[in-house]
Image: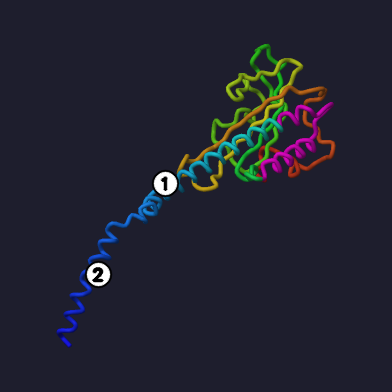
Amino acid sequence: MIMQNQHDSAAASPLKTTVLGALKDCRSGVAYIEFAYSLPIFILLCMYGVELANIAITNARVSNIASMMADGAARVRDRIDEADINELMVGAKFAGQGIDITNYGRIMISTVEDNAATATADDQTVTWRRCKGKEVPASGDVKVPEGPTLSAPVTANGTQIAAKPGNPVIFAQIIYKYQPIITDKFFGPITMNYSSAYSVRDRVVQTMQNGGSLADSAKSLCSAYNV
């Protein structure tokens, strides 16, 4: 029996050598190995591209909402009311629902007029200002401050805007803290800041009216930070 086992072992050796040689020369799995090495890089590039595309889309959306707010307020004729502003805020909220704009942003809208009380050409008066959103802007981010008088023209997207006598301007500004869909490791924290301005059309009374006798809690006052 012992001699028979040794014979079987000797007979198996050439077969074992043949199989190992075949495995050594096999190249059928090379493509899979290369794909496995490149897959993490490919996934990373796809994630980067998706995040970049979402940033571009969000930028466009925030910019469009700022323009919509300024244009909408400028079109209100005769006089503007607290109810008009509330309607504009609701419209902006729905337009920015996909990015939760009032939860992660701040919508600010004002009427800016020439300051007739002084002879200085650059003096501007903020007739009224209304806001919506929970985001608290950083110091210096707000282009039209709470105070009623500006000593210089408002700067919007690199352009200086100064209301002329008898030609008020609606100024809308949105500050939005971008919410990444994958991660902020690619681009870091991003705060978008867009503004838009339109001249008032056919409005006689520029001061804010309250025809519905809304309580302060029902107004879009800048002292409130809510959605």
Nearer to us in this view, 39 or 11: 11
Q: Residue at x 25, y 69 (%)?
A: 15
10 Å neighbourhood of mark 1: few (<14), some, or many (≥20)? few
Nearer to us in this view, 174 or 26: 26
User: Outermost residue, top direction?
Assistant: 119
151 in relation to 19, above or below: above
Where residue 53 sits: x, y (%)? 55, 39
10 Å neighbourhood of mark 2: few (<14), some, or many (≥20)? few
Identify the mark nearer the N-term, 1 or 2: 2
Q: How is the image coloured?
A: rainbow
- In screen coordinates, is 180 left or right of 197? left
- In screen coordinates, is 138 left or right of 202? left
Indicate whether residue 59 is drawn in magenta.
no
Q: Nearer the viewer, mark 1 or mark 2?
A: 2
User: Outermost residue, bottom direction?
Assistant: 1
Q: Amino acid at mark 1?
A: Ile
Residue hosting label 1: 41
Q: Residue at x 80, y 31 (%)?
A: 80
Q: Which residues are magenta?
A: 69-97
Question: Circle 2 — which element?
Answer: helix
Residue hosting label 2: 15
Where residue 35 sits: x, y (%)? 40, 51
Where residue 186 sits: x, y (%)? 46, 42
Question: Circle 1 — which element?
Answer: helix
Nearer to us in this view, 80 or 4: 4
